[in-house]
Amino acid sequence: MGRLFGTDGVRGVANADLTAEMALGLSVAAAHVLAEAGTFEGHRPTAVVGRDPRASGEFLEAAVVAGLASAGVDVLRVGVLPTPAVAHLTAALGADLGVMLSASHNAMPDNGIKFFARGGHKLADELEDRIEALYEEHRTGAPWDRPTGAGVGRVRDYHEGLDTYVAHLVGVLPNRLDGLKIVLDEAHGAASRVSPEAFSRAGAEVVTIGADPDGLNINDGCGSTHLDKLKAAVVEHGADLGIAHDGDADRCLAVDHTGEEVDGDQILAVLALALRERGALRSETVVATVMSNLGFKLAMEREGIQLVQTAVGDRYVLEEMKERGYALGGEQSGHVIVLDHATTGDGTLTGLLLAARVAQTGRTLRELASVMERLPQVLINVPDVDKSRVKTSPELAAAVAEAERELGETGRVLLRPSGTEPLVRVMVEAADSDQARTVAGRLADAVKSALG
């Protein structure tokens, strides 16, 4: 059996890969592993459980709650809230465990389970491995040690979760948003109530789209993976900017007043300058992945901000930030982490901070985002090759060296083996889009020749 836990919890097609039985079993296993680790010692354990609006989240939530309560854990059920809200509430309420049911930006049939440790932080890989091993052991027949009588967990709805989280978001803003008109695309997802409420309380005039979840329409042609509707709405309403979230609202992309996209790299650049101005950009450093646009790197160099780059994946960004004490990091996809105020990517917080910068400076988002110029970036996936030899093939090394000489300081080459598929990703950036396409095509051919 392959490892159940990926980089973002356990995820799969609900009721096929991810069943009620699995959700219940993993929850019981998580309770036992944390108890063995001493997390519950000296007190009655509590867990916060939330979900996004997917129809499958209803039965999966019931399974998770049943599993935790049967293992002696009291459950605070917060209902439909963003992933970062569940992380925040886990910390704010002093809970021992948080559980979020969501498949983020994936299509509706998928769902997932993500566990948070005390404080709202992602569980350590070692704990995930132990949960998986214990789940597998008991799935095949070993009986659980189950409490009875007053030892079983109690379950109650925690309706105050939304207000608690929104108050936190608005409370950390450096300034209000009065005078701004903002269009919010909620992806028919978990932030459909939270985000409009937060932006309104902060003073913005809010127009919403994609804010009517019915359990089936999450991420369907809307949200951060489909920006066309937001672009049109911003122009139609004469808004100052638009903000798009994904299904669980841990991401944020933006649109300026002309309808042009502002991606995660540009958002990071704007927020980096804002934090530095307030003395909050620790070590004057921002963390991003190797997939960030070269234009972002050049902009940070020009502004005197150090850039630390990690492997692709927000987990690696977060690990670097926590280890070194950095305040800001993120990905081109819009997964931005502001560690002073969140333990995970928070799309609503990111959008609020971006809008606050617009309000504070009196400049348009288009002007602010122009601090960096996005260089043309071409990505080609080369399938059915031996990805393990990417770093050892002399033929491929020669092709990369030749490409780097041609591009000089105004371009960049990145060859990356996929973590989940038998393919190699070829990424080329250049000052000219035609040159980027030509070089990428040539390198893709070299990958096929050397590794095919």
Image: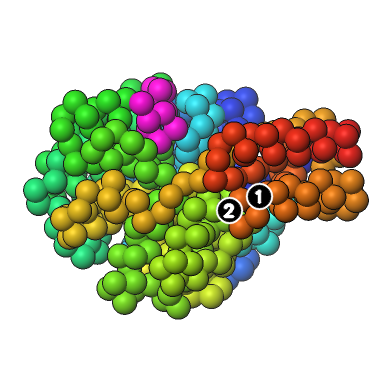
Q: Determine the CA span between mark 1 and mark 2.
A: 6 Å
Residue in front for this viewpoint, 221 or 18: 221
Q: Secondary structure at mark 1?
A: helix
In percent of width and height, residue 286 lies at 47, 66
- Toward which corner of the image does residue 449 lie, by quadrant? top right
Seen at 85% across and 50% down, the residue is 398
Q: Is residue 120 magenta?
A: no
- Tag on residue 280? none
Seen at 36% across and 26% down, the residue is 228
Residue in front for this viewpoint, 328 or 372: 372
Seen at 14% across and 41% down, the residue is 181
Q: For the residue marked with disc 1, what is the amino acid?
A: Leu
* Few, some or many residues within 10 Å of mark 1 (<14, 14–19, 20+): many
Q: Is residue 223 magenta?
A: yes
Q: Quadrant of the N terminus?
A: top right
Left or right position of 37 against 288: right
Q: For the residue marked with disc 2, what is the amino acid?
A: Thr
In percent of width and height, residue 52 lies at 40, 37
Left or right position of 16 against 63: right
In percent of width and height, residue 265 lies at 45, 51
Cβ–Cβ under 8 Å for marks 1 and 2? yes
Left or right position of 388 against 22: right
Seen at 44% across and 66% down, the residue is 302
Write down the region rendered in magenta.
217-228
What residue did someone put label 2 on?
410
What residue did someone put label 1 on?
407
Task: Identify the main secondary structure in magenta.
Answer: loop
